[in-house]
Image (cartoon, rainbow, N blue to C red):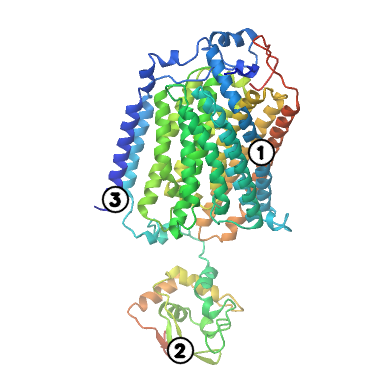
């Protein structure tokens, strides 16, 4: 076997390293035990029963993070965009003859309690808006939206597209929800709504 | 039996099994030698830290008394010099390409109207090019080059089939060129870390096999009874990566949620089971060599290696927290992410005890500076990663720049730093030329260190604020975007410093190649290099 030339760089380095057989320091072993204990604890507290489709089983409330502090507002515009635009449109004009407009609507600018009642229980019947009759179905949002969310979206529609009615508070919605707690069917139309106190 | 009982028993059994396995391995070196620390460490070198001020007489002392060791080392180097040189040249090219692409992508995040006339320069493509140039260019070229250099030395044998490794490297780089080209053209597989189309991946597989097989054949030719810890890491990285790459890129195998799970199984494992072991092996080899001491504890090495090997493969699931994947999978990956603290601690303690009392060597050895910074960043990024896996922290940091900062702390602060150090050590041994301007090494070091510091701090703060804003219902989404702007600019500053460091590094390398070769003449060669890069 031919011996290659030895480079000065190779000559001046230390020989290749090796290892001593010093035992593992006890703090490292203690750390190992602590980590294993953590693992057992973490697994024993994990929620594994939830169906996979739910992800890791965190509820909507947990994912939402910190609850809005006093003074902070829910984004009524976002709720409107998510829930209402399909029918009433982003412009608030609705679809002529099919879905009533919210812009300039006497119902939107009218009694806060009535407006909250519409959102909570929906309508199934004839309602007159801006002089035109609509025959349609407004879904109920009482089960899917909280009082604060309903108040936020109502406040939003009362301040958009030329509407200038005052805001609606969470307490108003909560009061209507309690008052109509026994109701299971949607309102039968504009006449029944007009009769509300 | 319910899921909880199965998961719990599997966890406990595997931990106990792993403990017994490591315990059973612990006395191996002592069984082959009466006193490992004396026999395995060559004669006459204890207490001779390698330094640039070393006189000729001490430099020749160990060489004269331990000629066989030196000759085996020289023969190993002669068999690898050419192929390692080729790997390193490619690494330099990809480092520059990746830096340019990364910096462009970074600037685009705060100046979106910059360079918009070309489709391939749009953010979605240039960022992907950056990631792939690092992941399949710079990191593997530097890491595999270093492995090719170190493994034959540690096995006291010559590299078998260096020509095949050279061919493999050529194929690999051809694959990368076409892969990046297809990404620039807009053709991609659409999964992070796996963007390169699978048709091109076939070339990677062929190239990788041609690099890996010679190393495995070399392992079979070994002339040592005990395998040094660096060989475990490098050998296993060469087994793990092909499996990861092949399974992850196999077309039509995974769909939907399964594909996402596999995607992060691959994405996380390629960091922990390929780049990390290659870099750790480089530290395990170079650190004791540079300070002239044996590694403190074989037992700690065992704990660090087998801990990594066992825990790491299961941690990828923490990228899917909150996703529609089984709860047990996510829970297990969170627990194993935390268990990773153990091998990280074992490595850290081992290096710390080895280095203890020899910190003065840092002043003379630029390689050691890079290695020590890299080793510290390994500890830092690993601990950070473990806690990032916890649901409470993940809720804030997931989908934010915080994760990007963490990824760069790992792949740049740790892996790239170590490879920089290794290249500074290896190049003089394979070319016979010393680094001509040691001050440029210092410039590179500080540009890289300060650059990554600015990068990391900016994005960590920005990412945390971004995550907090996204969780706050009362703030709009755009607010969480807008508030990151100053931190994104900070990232571009840090990135520019890092890129400048790489230009210095590459220019220095070019100057070294152009310069006069200083060759040893027989045995009476004086140490020509006055100041130098080891």
Q: Determine the image quadrant of residue A158.
A: bottom right
Tell me which label, 1 or 3, sits earlier in the chain.
3
Instruction: Name the chain letter of the residue that bears numbered label 1.
Output: B
Q: Residue B302 carries which label?
A: none
Let me know if residue B430 appears in the view.
Answer: yes
Say which element carries label 3: helix
Contact check, label 3 and label 2, Cβ < 8 Å: no
The x, y position of residue B167, in whole percent, is 60, 38
The x, y position of residue A66, in whole percent, is 46, 56
Tell me if mark 1 has few (under 14), some (14-19) or many (20+) residues whose alpha carbon lies within 10 angstroms of its own: many
Instruction: Name the chain letter of the residue that bears numbered label 3.
Output: B
| Residue bearing mark 2 | A190
Say which element carries label 1: helix
Quarter containing the N terminus of chain A: top right
> Distance from label 2 to label 1 (Cα)?
69 Å
* B9 and A71: which is toward the camera: B9
| Residue bearing mark 3 | B4
Let me know if residue B380 appears in the view.
Answer: no
- Residue at coordinates 62% horizontally, 45% vertically from top-left? B133
| Residue bearing mark 1 | B498
> Distance from label 1 to label 3 (Cα)?
47 Å
Say which element carries label 2: helix
Q: Are marks 2 and 1 on the same chain?
A: no
Q: Determine the image quadrant of residue A101.
A: bottom right
* B181 and B307: which is toward the camera: B181
Quarter containing the C terminus of chain A: bottom left
Q: Residue furthest front?
A: A1
């Amino acid at each position: 076997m031919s011996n290659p030339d030895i480079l000065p760089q190779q000559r001046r380095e230390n020989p290749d390293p090796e290892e001593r057989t010093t035992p593992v320091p006890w703090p490292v072993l203690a750390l190992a035990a602590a980590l294993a204990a953590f693992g057992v604890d973490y697994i024993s507290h994990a929620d594994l029963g939830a169906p996979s489709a739910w992800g890791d089983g965190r509820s909507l409330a947990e994912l939402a993070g910190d609850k809005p502090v006093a003074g902070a507002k829910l984004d009524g515009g976002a709720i409107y965009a998510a829930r209402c635009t399909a029918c009433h449109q982003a412009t608030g004009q609705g679809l002529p003859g099919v879905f009533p407009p919210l812009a300039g609507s006497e119902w939107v600018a009218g009694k806060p309690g009535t407006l909250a009642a519409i959102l909570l229980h929906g309508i199934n019947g004839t309602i007159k808006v801006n002089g035109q009759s609509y025959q349609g179905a407004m879904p109920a949002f009482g089960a899917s939206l909280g009082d604060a969310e309903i108040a936020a979206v109502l406040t939003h529609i009362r301040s958009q597209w030329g509407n200038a009615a005052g805001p609606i508070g969470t307490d108003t919605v909560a009061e209507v929800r309690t008052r109509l707690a026994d109701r299971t069917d949607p309102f039968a139309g504009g006449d029944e709504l007009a009769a509300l106190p | 039996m319910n899921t909880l009982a199965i998961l719990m028993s599997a966890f406990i059994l595997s931990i106990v099994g792993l403990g017994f396995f490591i315990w059973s391995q612990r006395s191996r070196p002592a069984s082959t030698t009466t006193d490992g620390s004396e026999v395995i460490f060559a004669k006459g070198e204890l207490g001779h830290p390698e330094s640039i001020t070393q006189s000729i007489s001490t430099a020749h002392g160990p060489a004269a008394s331990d000629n066989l060791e030196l000759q085996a080392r020289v023969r190993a180097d002669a068999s690898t010099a050419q192929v390692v040189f080729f790997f390193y040249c490619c690494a330099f090219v990809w480092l520059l390409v990746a830096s340019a692409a990364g910096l462009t992508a970074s600037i685009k995040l705060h100046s979106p109207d910059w360079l918009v006339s070309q489709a391939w320069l749009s953010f979605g493509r240039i960022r992907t090019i950056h990631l792939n140039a690092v992941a399949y260019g710079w990191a593997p070229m530097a890491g595999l080059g270093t492995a090719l250099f170190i493994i034959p030395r540690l096995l006291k044998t010559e590299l078998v089939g260096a020509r095949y490794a050279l061919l493999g490297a050529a194929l690999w780089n051809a694959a990368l060129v076409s892969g990046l080209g297809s990404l620039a053209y807009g053709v991609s597989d659409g999964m992070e870390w796996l963007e390169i189309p699978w048709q091109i991946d076939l070339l990677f597989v062929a190239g990788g096999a041609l690099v890996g097989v010679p190393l495995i054949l070399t392992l079979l030719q070994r002339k040592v009874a005990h395998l040094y810890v660096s060989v475990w890491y490098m050998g296993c990285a060469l087994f793990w990566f092909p499996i990861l790459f092949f399974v992850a890129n196999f077309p039509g195998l995974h769909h939907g949620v399964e594909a996402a799970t596999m995607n992060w199984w691959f994405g996380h494992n390629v960091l922990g089971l390929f780049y990390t072991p290659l870099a750790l092996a480089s530290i395990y080899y170079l650190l004791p060599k540079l300070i002239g001491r044996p590694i403190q504890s074989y037992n700690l090495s065992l704990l660090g290696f087998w801990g990594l090997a066992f825990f790491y493969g299961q941690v990828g699931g923490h990228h899917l927290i909150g996703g529609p994947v089984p709860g047990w999978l996510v829970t297990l990956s969170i627990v194993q992410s935390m268990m990773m603290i153990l091998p990280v601690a074992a490595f850290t303690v081992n290096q710390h005890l080895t280095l203890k009392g020899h910190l003065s060597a840092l002043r003379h050895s630029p390689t050691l500076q890079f290695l020590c910074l890299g080793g510290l960043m390994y500890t830092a990024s690993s601990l950070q990663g473990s806690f990032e896996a916890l649901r409470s922290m993940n809720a804030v940091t997931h989908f934010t720049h915080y994760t990007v900062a963490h990824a760069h702390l790992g792949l740049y602060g740790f892996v790239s730093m170590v490879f920089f150090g290794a290249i500074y050590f290896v190049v003089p041994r394979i070319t016979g030329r010393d680094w001509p301007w040691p001050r440029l090494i210092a410039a590179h070091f500080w540009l890289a260190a300060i650059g990554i510091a600015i990068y990391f701090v900016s994005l960590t703060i920005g990412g945390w604020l971004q995550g907090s804003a996204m969780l706050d219902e009362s703030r709009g989404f755009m607010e969480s975007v807008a508030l990151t702007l100053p931190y994104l600019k900070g990232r571009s500053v840090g990135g520019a410093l890092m890129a400048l460091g790489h230009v210095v590094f590459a220019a220095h390398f070019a100057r070294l190649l152009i310069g006069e070769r200083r060759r040893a003449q027989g045995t009476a060669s004086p140490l020509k290099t006055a100041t130098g890069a080891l």
